[in-house]
Image (cartoon, rainbow, N blue to C red):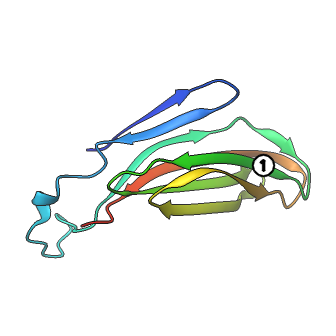
Amino acid sequence: NAQGTITEGSEGIIKMTLNDWLPNPEICQNHSGSHLCTKYGVASGPYAITNKVTVKKGDVASYTFKAKKTSDNYELFAGMYSDKDGLVDYQFFRGVLQDWKTFELKSPETALYYVEFMLAGYDRTG
């Protein structure tokens, strides 16, 4: 079972990690396609939700992240939600490595928003 952690750093930085990503591949050596065994597994990890803030129409909520290289791919979902309309913008990334990079989620109208981040791992080797 995957174990996730969230650590708060300085200047509003949070660190989300996913340990023991996926089950031992030997479990699925004889992949039959049943729901008991999947050759390529996914592990969901921790998630974080920001405080609500007012964002003006046309402005953005930006975030910066990086992902370290492991034997599996990382997956990151970042979604911007409003109290009125629910999910208004999102981004999903899967990859091997990501250096520090800033991304933006757009506000379609002036409203109170929060952003939710979800971390997962995908077995890229089977």
Number of disc labels? 1
Q: Position of residue 23 (x, y in %)?
A: 21, 52
Q: Residue at x 65, y 23 (%)?
A: 10
Direction from residue 37 to residue 83 in the image, left or right? right
Q: What residue is pinned by disc 1? A: 61
Q: Residues within 10 Å of mark 1 (few under 14, many from 20)?
A: some
Against 58, residue 1 (above or below) is: above
Q: Residue at x 48, y 49 (%)?
A: 119
Q: Position of residue 38 (x, y in %)?
A: 22, 67
Direction from residue 120 to residue 2 in the image, left or right? left
Which element carries disc 1, helix, strand or loop? strand
Direction from residue 65 to residue 37 in the image, left or right? left
Asked where in the image residue 37 lies, by quadrant, the reply is bottom left
Of 122 and 54, the residue lying toward us = 122
Identity of the residue furthest to the top in this view: 10
Q: Position of residue 27 (x, y in %)?
A: 11, 58
Residue type at numbered disc 1: Ala
Q: Position of residue 48 (x, y in %)?
A: 57, 39
Q: Residue at x 58, y 51 (%)?
A: 99
